[in-house]
Amino acid sequence: MDMTLNAFTLSILTGLQLGSIYVLIALGLTLIFGTLGVVNFAHGALYLIAIYLAVSINNALGFGLALILVPPILFIIGVLLERGLIQRFYDRPHTDQILVTFGLAIVIQELLKWAFGANNIPFSIPSWGNGIIFMHDYLPFLEGFVVYPKWRMILVVVAIVTVSAVFALLHLTRFGLVIRAGMRDAEMLQFLGVNINRRFMVVFGLGAMIAGIAGVFGGPVTQVSPEVGMQLLVPSFLIVVIGGMGSLGGAVLASILIGMAQSFTAPYIYINTIIIYLITVIILLVRPRGLLGAKGVFE
Amino acid sequence: MTTQNNFWQHNRTVLIFALIALTMPFWFPLMGGYSGLDTKIMIFCIFVVGFDILLGFTGYLSFGHAAFFGISAYVTGIMLKSFSDNIIPAILVAVLAATVVAVIIGLLTLKRTGIYFSILTLAFAEMFDSMAMSMLQKWTGGENGLTGMPTPMLFNLKMQGDTVFYFVTLMAILLFYLAKRIERSPVGLMMKAIKCNQTRLEFTGINARKYKLLAFVISAVYAAIAGALMVVYEPFVGHEFLGWHQSGEIVIMSVIGGVGTLVGPMLGAGFMLYFENVLSVNLGEQWLLVLGAIFMAVVIFMPGGFMEGIARLKKRYFTTVDGE
């Protein structure tokens, strides 16, 4: 491929940035699926709530407050949703879960469209995140003048920090130990006297909170309009499936893979539009459980 | 029991459906339905009845059936435009094309179950949608859709207005009758056994995959016929015919009506299109919100859809104390 080093680097950066948004949505999806066994089609709608909250608070009170307020609010919304609706569906078939959350997604999307209108709402980036980064100052192998939008690099950093925090929570704390045990065998955990229901609630809240973080930082990039939720949900779902349902590592890996694939095929429009579906189909046919899917999970 | 009695018992629902459907032009305008909407309802009845053979009988939830609907619609449109304005060759070629695609997709996707199957079918449909918008633009018209078809003809008969309605309705009655025949045939029983317990079915030495593929392809053929008729009804094909919105709509219709009952999904289709086109006038912009809420309520409180509601009402008001 006759690609210059500069173009190659920019493609890598764009791939990372695309993957960052995907991973923030897919992480919550796969966390909820792996622990609660619930296929949440409303996760894109949670992201939608997050970006509308973020843009409203940002425009009225500033970005700092949006950053402080939106993730906790999303956590509370997640907990309320789990208590009020999702917990009734633990014992129902997966198809019922897909259907009810699909309905919920429509309701949330239409409510937001009603309240904010169907058009894109401009989300202004705070002054410290505006502008561009001179990549050639940091990467000496680049030739000449290479720049990249600063905000998109911040998004990548946020995604890395969030992913690391979730992994630390799951692997370094007692709470994480219980959650991981719950992902393995929830029934056994209950026999051991662990109140798994309470933790399920927290996990759902956590998934929603990650969508909240995604909304605060992703809003300016993905735009703020009612269609964004579903537009992001479909690729994120494919990513969760490619990575292996319920596998956090798989979700991260698949996000990067899809981000890179989309970034590198960008010059070839015909391939670019179908690459994600093509990869999904190929991977699922070759590796039925996805890249890192565990045996016996949802089969 | 005489043969006549048997015939009546087996085909009661089909005859009632035929009666209701064929008289639609007389009573439908009374409840605010404009002419043409009845045709569209009949087309979607065909789509959902076929979909129920897959979802209702075998339990496989496809989120990509719009692919067959859309492919067939595009092929019909292209045939009408460049081959002949007669609809018979157009429909035949379109259904054949969709069937070939269905066999290939079915062979690939039916290896998986549950959510994996749903996602794979979704991915295939979205792939076709993207292809229609980019590399096949020359034939599909891309963003603008496929237009410029001549008035479709059934040999010497112009397919317009009531002619289309009766043509479509006769097809719907025939296809509903066939679905009923499939339901009570041994093949239908096998399909239902897949939903109950596929592993057990396979242990008895039966090749479940064969029946799954059959159900998938039959439902795709129904979708393809609906797609072709859609072009006969209105000479336009847009890429939204292929999109996940279309697939989702079919799922909603089936669930609201009652999955696995054949009649239920048709009720759902009628309700949804009536709601979307007539009641929505009163609700304004928020009709989709109300529809989403109704859909959620049905899934939460009445998983069997309208048919379960009807059964409950029947039980409540038509059962005497001693149970009959």
Image: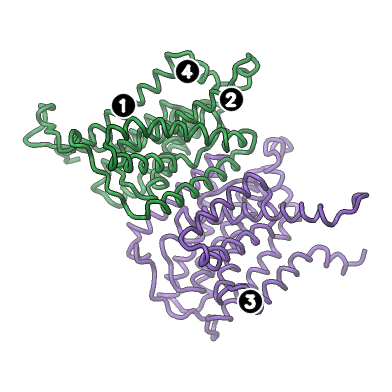
- The circle on residue A176 is 4
Per the image, the residue denoted by label 3 is B30
Q: Position of residue B173 (x, y in %)?
A: 67, 69
The quadrant of the image that shows the C terminus of chain A is: top right
Chain B on-screen colour: purple
- Relative depth, front residue between B210 and B216: B216
Per the image, the residue denoted by label 2 is A197
- Residue at left offset 47%, top offset 18%: A176
Residue A218, by quadrant, is top left
Q: Earlier in the sequence, mark 4 or mark 1?
A: 1
Per the image, the residue denoted by label 1 is A160
| Marks 2 and 1 on same chain | yes
- Residue at left offset 37%, top offset 41%: A53
- Relative depth, front residue between A186 and A7: A186
Residue B260 visible in the displayed image:
yes
Chain A on-screen colour: green
Q: Label 4 sits on what residue type? A: Gly
The span from disc 4 to disc 3 (Cα, nearest Å) is 62 Å
* Crowding near the residue tagged with mark 4, few <14, some 14–19, many ≥20 C-alpha atoms within 10 Å: some
Q: Secondary structure at mark 4?
A: helix
The span from disc 3 to disc 1 (Cα, nearest Å) is 61 Å
